[in-house]
Every structure is written in structure tokens, then in C-alpha cells.
Image: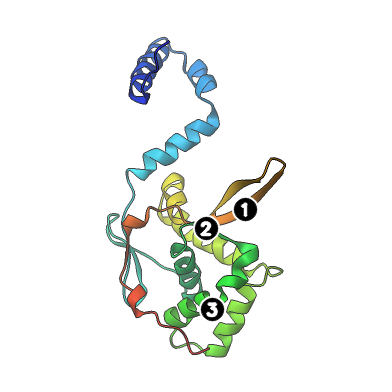
Amino acid sequence: MTDRTPEAIAAELSLLVKELVKAGRNDLLLRSIGVPIIENLRLEAAKNRLSRLRITKDYRFFLVDYGNKEVEMSPVHKAVYLLFLAHPEGIEFKRLRDFRDELLDYYMATARFMDKQIIKESVDMLTDPLNNSINEKCSRIKSVFLNMLDQYTANYYMISGHTQRHVNGSSKIWYERLKVIILPRELVQNEAMSCISPSNR
């Protein structure tokens, strides 16, 4: 049996799909592909329609290719978003304490006219693993994008969960429950990053 290339398999699959559709058997097509794969295909299709995200020097967020729509968020939500945007590898909520100073810098930058003590207290709550504040902020960010975009496109911009499996030796398996923004970073035009300097902590 000769090895087939992915391209050859895709061409064969295309013919088989057309035959099932022509026979009116979408039920068999759905059963053979499976709902999880269909969801992944919808996400992949949305990827081809993604807009660039422009962040200006004064921390305004715009979806450039969707009519330059502004993504309106409060300073604290922008700070949380900037933190996760800066870490495409993802961050576990329980380890947010390790990123406290970085989050503080973002919040100080996005809320320049707010009381610094209030900002620090808010960051302490956001990075406290026993506090629900970070979940509330991520939920609000999700709502903002869902109000602007369809569900599959919004998935690329929101902060979402990703579980990464690790194997240590032959017996120990552990999981990282990461939160990530899966938007390809080449679509991010961040004019503000050069303006952020360590805050006066």
C-alpha cells in the first residue's frame, strides 16, 4: 500500500463528500465527520475572515478590517486583555500572581488618571486565586466581542480556555488549564507597547 499525501486524501474526500450530498445523505456525512470536527472547521473558516486588531498609543482598540469598529472596554478590561495578548503561550489563572507587576503596568498605562492605590487593590484582587475578579473580567471581554462578531470569529479575540496535556515519564500525567487569546499575533498592530514603562509601584 502506497502512502498518500494529505493533498491526495483531501481530493478523495472531496469526491466522497460530493457523492453523499448528491445522494441527499447529509445525515451520513454528519455522522462520519462528527460534531467536534465540524466545530473546528467552523473556527478554521472564520480564521480566513479575521480582522487586524489595532491598539493605538492612547489604548483604543479597533478592528481595522471590520469598518474600523472600536472595541470599547474599560481600562481594567484593556489591561487584562493586554496581559494575555502579550503571552500567546497562555497563562493559568492560578499563576496570575507571577504576572502581577506586568498587569499593574498595563493597568497604570490604561488608567493614567485613576488613583494608583485603587489600581493596585484591583490588581491584587485580579491576581488572587481565591477571588473571582479575573473570571468576571474575562466574561465581560467575551461579551464585548460576542456583541460585535459572530461566535466563531469572536473565539479568536476573546480570552478562552485551553487544556494542555503533559506527560512526565511513563506514569505521571498532568494538565495545564491555560487561558489564551488565539488571534494570530501577526494581525495585532500594537502601537501602545513602546509607551508602557514600569509603573511607580
Q: Is residue 13 left or right of residue 30?
A: left
Q: Position of residue 100 (x, y in %)?
A: 57, 75
SS label for mark 1? strand
Amino acid tagged 2: Gly
Residues at discs 2 and 3 in contact (Cβ within 8 Å): no
Which is nearer the N-term, disc 3 or disc 1?
3
Locate residue 188: give its quadrant: bottom left
Which is nearer the N-term, disc 2 or disc 1?
2
Q: CA distance from mark 2 to mark 1?
A: 10 Å
Amino acid tagged 3: Asp
Q: Residue at x 65, y 49 (%)?
A: 175
Badge 3 crowding class, 10 Å Cα cut-off, few under 14, some 14 to 19, many 20 or more, is some
Label 3: which residue? 101
SS label for mark 2? loop
Label 2: which residue? 90
- 175 to 90, vertically: above or below: above
Amino acid tagged 1: Glu
Label 1: which residue? 176
Locate residue 2: give its quadrant: top left
SS label for mark 3? helix
- Location of the N terminus by quadrant is top left
Q: Is residue 42 left or right of residue 178?
A: left
- 90 to 45, vertically: above or below: below
Residues at discs 2 and 1 in contact (Cβ within 8 Å): yes
Q: Position of residue 106 (x, y in %)?
A: 46, 76
Q: Residue at x 37, y 44 (%)?
A: 47
- Tell me how many marks there are: 3
Q: CA distance from mark 2 to mark 3?
A: 17 Å
